[in-house]
Image: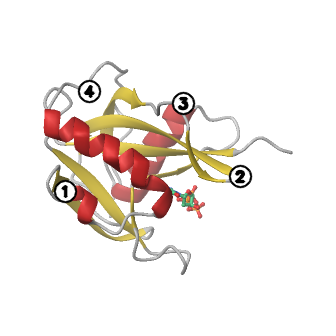
Amino acid sequence: MPPPRLVVGAVLVDRLDRPARVLAARRTRPPELAGRWELPGGQVEAGETPEDALHRELAEELGVTVRLGAELVSGHGPTWPLTPGLVLRAWWCELVEGVPVAGEAHDAVCWSTAADVADLAWLEPDRPLVERVVAALAAGAPVDGGTTREGAGTLDA
Ligand SMILES: Nc1nc2c([nH]c(=O)n2[C@H]2C[C@H](O)[C@@H](COP(=O)(O)OP(=O)(O)OP(=O)(O)O)O2)c(=O)[nH]1
């Protein structure tokens, strides 16, 4: 069986040192996933590191540049299962440049707090991850600790 394909997702928060709000994005496609909320991101392409893929997806989808913080790891390691053929890795991050705007992949973005993020209609596989995000936002503990990448530029939405 081929290894699962890797999807990367951004847990984009207002600030890495004291996160209080996280950004969710509402998918436009495919029809069976349209209308559900997700972490912005997408599939890692051949020859890309996961981190590079995340920067690329955020520039393409939301027109923003970010600073990566810590990786959000599950109780079983870095990957979160999505479907039998797909796993997710996710990083906390904060904005360096740009204001997130929905592009083609999404028809809405919203900033939510620990009190309301779980009320969104998330893609089902994201639920365990969202629980962890809620707990971290409620605690407000720092989620920094990653690498910085500047100069990726911004896109028009
Ligand atoms: N980006 C993202 N995808 C997720 C999440 N949860 C989840 O089950 N998925 C699934 C939905 C998709 O089947 C797959 C990601 O594929 P995608 O369509 O977003 O990837 P992509 O941007 O590279 O694809 P494309 O534009 O080339 O069509 O992972 C999530 O939180 N974020």
Left or right of 51? Residue 69 is: left
The residue located at (38%, 63%) in the rendering is 122
Q: How is the image coloured?
A: secondary structure
Categorize mark 4 by other alpha carbons within 10 Å: few (<14), some (14-19), many (20+): many
Residue 97 rendering spot, x and y as whole percentages? 23, 42
Q: Name the residue tied to disc 4.
A: 143
**Disc marking residue 111:** 1
Q: Earlier in the sequence, mark 4 or mark 1?
A: 1
Of residue 134 and residue 13, the one placed in the foreground of this image is 134
| 3D distance between C-alphas at marks 4 and 1 | 17 Å
The residue located at (45%, 63%) in the rendering is 123
Does 82 appear above or below 8? Answer: below
**Mark 3 falls on what kind of element?**
loop
Q: Are marks 1 and 2 in contact (CB under 8 Å)?
A: no
Residue type at tag 3: His
Q: Earlier in the sequence, mark 3 or mark 4?
A: 3
Q: Name the residue tied to disc 3.
A: 76
Image quadrant containing the C terminus: bottom left
Residue type at tag 4: Val
Residue type at tag 1: Trp
Q: Earlier in the sequence, mark 1 or mark 2?
A: 2
Residue type at tag 2: Gly
**Disc marking residue 85:** 2
Q: Place residue 126 in its image quadrant.
A: bottom left
Does 21 appear above or below 31? Answer: above
